[in-house]
Image (cartoon, grey):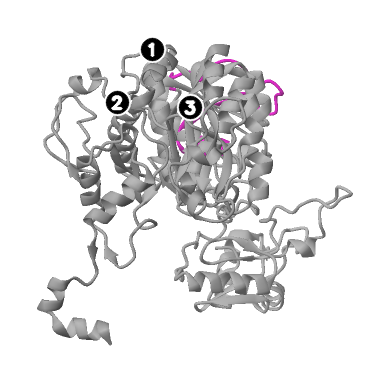
Amino acid sequence: GPGVATKLEGLEGSLSLFSTAGRKACPLCPEEKFKACYSHKLRRHLQNLHWKVYAEFEGQRMCICHLPCRQLKPSPNGDQAPGRLGAHYHCVVCSVTIARKTDMISHLKRHVNKGETEASYLAPSGLAFEIMKELGTNVQLMPNHTTPQKTDTYFNRKMKTNRQLVFCSLAVLAEERNPLDCLDAFGATGIMGLQWAKHLRNAVKVTITDVNEACVKMIRENCQLNHIRVEGSRGSSRVPDGGAGGGVDGMTIAAVEVAKMDANVIMHLRPFDYIHLDPFGTAVNYLDSAFRNVRNLGIISVTSTDTSSLYSKSLNVTLRHYGSNIVRTEYYKELAARMVLATVARSAARCNKGIEVLLAVALEHFVLVVVRVLRGPTQADESAKRIRQLIHCQWCEERVFLKQGSMVEENLYRQLPCHCHGSMPGKTAVELGPLWSGPLFNTGFLRRMLFAAVQHSMDDIQPLVKTLICESECTTLKSSVHGTAALTNQVECGVVIKVQKVDECNTSDHSGKRKTGDEPGNVMKKLKSDASLEHPAFYYSIHRHSIRGMNMPKLNKFLQYLTEAGFRVSRTHFDPTGVRTDATLDQFKAVLTKYSVPTYTNSSATQNPEETLRVVE
């Protein structure tokens, strides 16, 4: 990597790349700072300026670099900061650029604490980027691509699951109608839009935009790397409406439109069938313009990465961005998803549009919601009615959505199934929200997403999508979901699946969601009639409610006991220890208590007297 070597000769070895007619340029300084000179003078320069100013890690020196690798912020009068401030070190582990030596040493200590001691970034000398491959798509990345604050072309490997879920949702829409006008509004490296174009070819007309010139340049280069033709005139204020043709141009396999434009501007200018929003942090600033021009029955997917405000760490930011009052709860991830959906539904309603939620996923690094847009004031009204307040008991964590109606109730505690308010002094519950109170999943859509994941060999997300299907039906028994042949018995969600034909599965109405063949326009009528069959809101963590001094049953066994007691039950992707059920907390605890056994029973005491003696002591 730039400025990384074990010996001074290593730095000198890279000089042949920069030599000009006997004179040699410094590999770590721009030409205006240090002009090409003869080798003895250059060796002295390297030794005194670069080799002596270094940070060491695992026997390798990270010498100071003066190349314009860092994006310097302009000073208030518009000038660039002085050249000396542009000096920096390149981390040998993660390739981030850091200006101060003390900061670099602290940064390296953090790597050691995490057990990351391998030098993963050792690009060939003279190359300012590395090439990464994901889903058969190559992208070149800047050395500091992992830190969003210090690079324009940010790339996060941990978001691979997110990219695959978004891709599958687009693939399902492409089956319904094509060619689709789809927008990747925050391109960065262009990885997502390029994957769409590469795998879906003529079914999609992809537009990738970014407001940053460096990103747009990188996206264009990545298009060439993947044999994808770039469309759209560079620097033009208006992006042409001509679609990306599927014709083979030499080696090109697809075409993509690339534009340097703000996301809000392009969404106001042009209508799209599919829009994906993935800004750095919250997406609330872009929702109004997304719904303004999206086509009827189109899909909008929103990835929010502001986990500190979503997961109840920065409550003032939560209130500012989402207008919601929340506290940290055992079901905080679902709370975050419902809060984002409430904001999405309000933005849609302002444009006289309603939403049907197709899926909502909240994992460690992001919250992804995918919604279908239903045009018309009636649909908007139905969606707006789904935005409700939640009462949450701070003692036992029981929760219930407030009943609809504008009349003031004397005692809201009556709506909570628990009796904490009667047995505890003072106020015991808080009012949270506004939150989305409707379903978070559409079973038919998820089944088709699973089929798309299998078709495009996305093995990573298939278990997650299967869990989502179980969760949407609130069952541990999952029938076959893809292909024409029925699957034999398989273990899914910890329980053996019953064999069921696909045509049965598609025509049966047990799930309460629309069938695969239903028109999305009839969704609201369907949801009204089948509201009782929607999956229950929220979940209980079996660890949070375990009984002290008792060994609780295995989670899969406990799910079976709850089902036998007559409740609807499923696991949830939000929490591996969570149980989604329509049972109240008291009923949940009663079943848990019934099947938990004391840690030290009389039978074990008779079998093992030494154990009992040790306990008594």
Q: Which residue is mark 1?
A: 519
Query: Dot 1: what SS?
Result: loop
- Look at the image and give the residue range highlighted in magenta: 219-248
Side of 3 relative to 515 (left or right): right
Q: Residue 297 location in percent, x, y?
A: 48, 16
Q: CA distance from mark 2 to mark 1?
A: 16 Å
Q: Earlier in the sequence, mark 2 or mark 1?
A: 2
Q: Is residue 52 above or below residue 597?
A: below
The residue singled out by tag 3 in the image is 371
Lower position in the chain sequence, tag 3 or tag 2: 3
Q: Position of residue 328 (x, y in %)?
A: 53, 52
Q: Which residue is most to the bottom?
A: 617
- Image spot of residue 528 (x, y percent): 42, 18
Type of amino acid at the residue the image marks with label 1: Glu
Q: Is residue 369 visible?
A: yes
Which secondary structure, mark 3?
strand
Tell me which amino acid carries mark 3: Val
Q: Secondary structure at mark 2?
A: loop
- Which residue does the numbered mark 2 point to in the structure image? 511
